[in-house]
Image: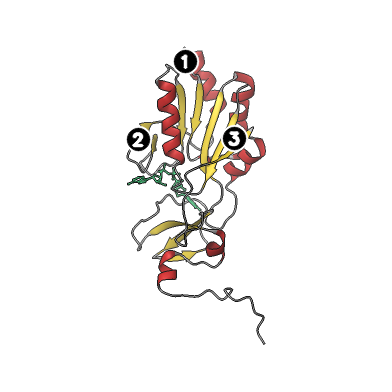
Amino acid sequence: MPELVFFSGTMDCGKSTLALQRIHNRSARGLQGVIFTRDDRAGEGKLSSRLGLVTDAVEAAPGMDLYAYVVGRMTQGDRVDYLIVDEAQFLASEQVDQLARVVDDLNLDVFAFGITTDFRARLFPGSQRLIELADRIEALQVEAMCWCGARATHNARTVGGEMVVEGEQVVVGDVNGPAAEVGYEVLCRRHHRRRMTSAAAHAGILSPDVLPVAPA
Ligand SMILES: Nc1ncnc2c1ncn2[C@@H]1O[C@H](COP(=O)(O)OP(=O)(O)O)[C@@H](O)[C@H]1O
Ligand SMILES: Cc1cn([C@H]2C[C@H](O)[C@@H](COP(=O)(O)O)O2)c(=O)[nH]c1=O
């Protein structure tokens, strides 16, 4: 049975690498997929991994009907065996519904890859809909790590090196970026809650909620 699978995790946990490996393994067996992405750091119409691999992809622009696009490709005679969707968190909710329709009506596997929550630990619309509709949700086995050594489960945004909790939901960026700009760092929940990035920890800054003692 074809499936809608959501491979989810934090930033920098290997999602795009896994997407590229799936494409590679299928293409080695003669299978051809439609590769969608949205707002990849490498630029429009690119699916890139931090390991240096990159492939061309179809930009899943806002308002684009992904089901109609796939039907159009098949109607013009293109072979379509499966779909890969990277940066799936950025999809609109209705675009995820269109992916589910690809599975159910066109009998194709759809593998979606994306981060679950934003820098405020709130679901992205695309991720929320994937959690609601996916046949399976897979956590990546190569987990990203917080600076404390725990498994990283959350994404922090930094501006000028300071963790922020307000701002636009979508700001394309990278981990280990220049401190002066918008950057990201993966953290465990404890340190995300305490707003303690690696820089803050090394500076010895203690959050007020380290000791949950009510003021006298
Ligand atoms: N120089 C490196 N050597 C080995 N592995 C690396 C290196 N740089 C990045 N990686 C691996 O690539 C992962 C990030 O892969 P990527 O597919 O870009 O992540 P995601 O799409 O989840 O943000 C890192 O977690 C790490 O495992
Ligand atoms: C947490 C968070 C991330 N983003 C952006 C930053 C990156 O461009 C992508 C994630 O890409 P990755 O391959 O998984 O590293 O999402 C954002 O726009 N808003 C956020 O809150």
Above or below — where is 216 with respect to 165?
Answer: below
Q: Is residue 90 visible?
A: no
The nearer-to-camera label among 2 and 3 is 2
Establish whether ligand 1 lies closer than 8 Å to the Cβ of label 1. no
User: What is the x, y in percent for residue 33?
Assistant: 46, 23
Cα gap from disc 3 to disc 1, whole angstroms? 22 Å
Residue 79, numbered circle: 1
Residue placed under numbered mark 2 in the picture: 54
The amino acid beneath tag 1 is Arg
Residue drawn 46% across and 50% down? 144
Point out the tag, 2 or 3, that comes first from the N-terminus: 2
User: What is the x, y in percent for residue 211?
Assistant: 60, 76
- Would you say 100 lies left or right of 204 here? right
Residue placed under numbered mark 3 in the picture: 96
| Ligand 1 location (quadrant) | top left
Residue 199, picture quadrant = bottom left
Residue drawn 47% across and 32% down? 36
Q: Is residue 171 visible?
A: yes
Query: Is 153 in front, or is 54?
Result: 153
The amino acid beneath tag 3 is Val
User: What is the x, y in percent for residue 22?
Assistant: 45, 29
Residue 43, picture quadrant = top left
The amino acid beneath tag 2 is Val
Mark 3 nearby-residue class (10 Å; few <14, some 14–19, many ≥20) = many
Above or below — where is 121 with respect to 211?
Answer: above
Query: Is 152 in front, or is 49?
Result: 152
Asked if disc 3 and disc 1 are in contact, CB closer than 8 Å, the reply is no
